[in-house]
Amino acid sequence: MRTSIIQFRRHVKQWREHIIAFQFNRVVWERFVEMSVLAGCLNLPGWEENPLPWLQCESFAPPLEMIDPIKDISAEKEEIRAGLKTRRMALAERGFDIDSIHAELEEEHTDARARGLSFDTDMAAPSGENQAIDDEDSDSSESYESNQDSKAHKNGE
């Protein structure tokens, strides 16, 4: 069942990107900008010399629902951590613009701090939980190094 859903989504994604976004949205955007300039509604500097920068657009399709949200989000986090995908790419796949998300997060966090609230999603605020994780990481790296020393000692190195 999951394989069928994944295959269906792959077809939907291709259709969205190659038909809707490229052949429809792009053409509509170009005509809209051209007609707005010709009608005098828009005054775009450099339009006569080179209109291409003004005609570029990016389409964001609404996201498809997740099959298994916990697994899907976990896999996406791992892709981002491994450098296989950026946060910008992940948000675009869900139909969001990273700049508007960052602005909204900044506003939310500023408001929360002003009210004396602290949430684990606020990476700028010091968190006891994050500190505990950092302490565990440093302990595990020390134990790893001591294990390496003892293995080297057993091997006569």
Image (cartoon, helix red, strand yellow):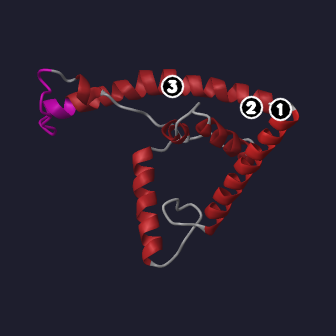
Work out which quarter of the rendered image holds the N terminus and state it: top right
x 70%, y 48%: residue: 141
| 41 part of magenta stretch | yes
Q: Which mark is residue 1?
A: 1
Q: Which amino acid is tagged 3?
A: Glu
Residue 124 position in % (x across, y down):
48, 61
Q: Which mark is residue 95?
A: none
Res. 154 image quadrant: top right
x 61%, y 39%: residue: 81
- Mark 3 closeness class: few <14, some 14–19, many ≥20 residues within 10 Å: some
Distance from disc 2 to disc 3, alpha carbons, whole Å, reads 18 Å
Which label's residue is closer to the chain start, 1 or 3? 1
Q: Do the residues labelled 1 and 2 touch (CB within 8 Å)?
A: yes
- Residue ID for mark 2: 5
- Residue ID for mark 3: 17
x 68%, y 52%: residue: 137
Secondary element at tag 3: helix
* Magenta stretch, residue numbers: 35-49
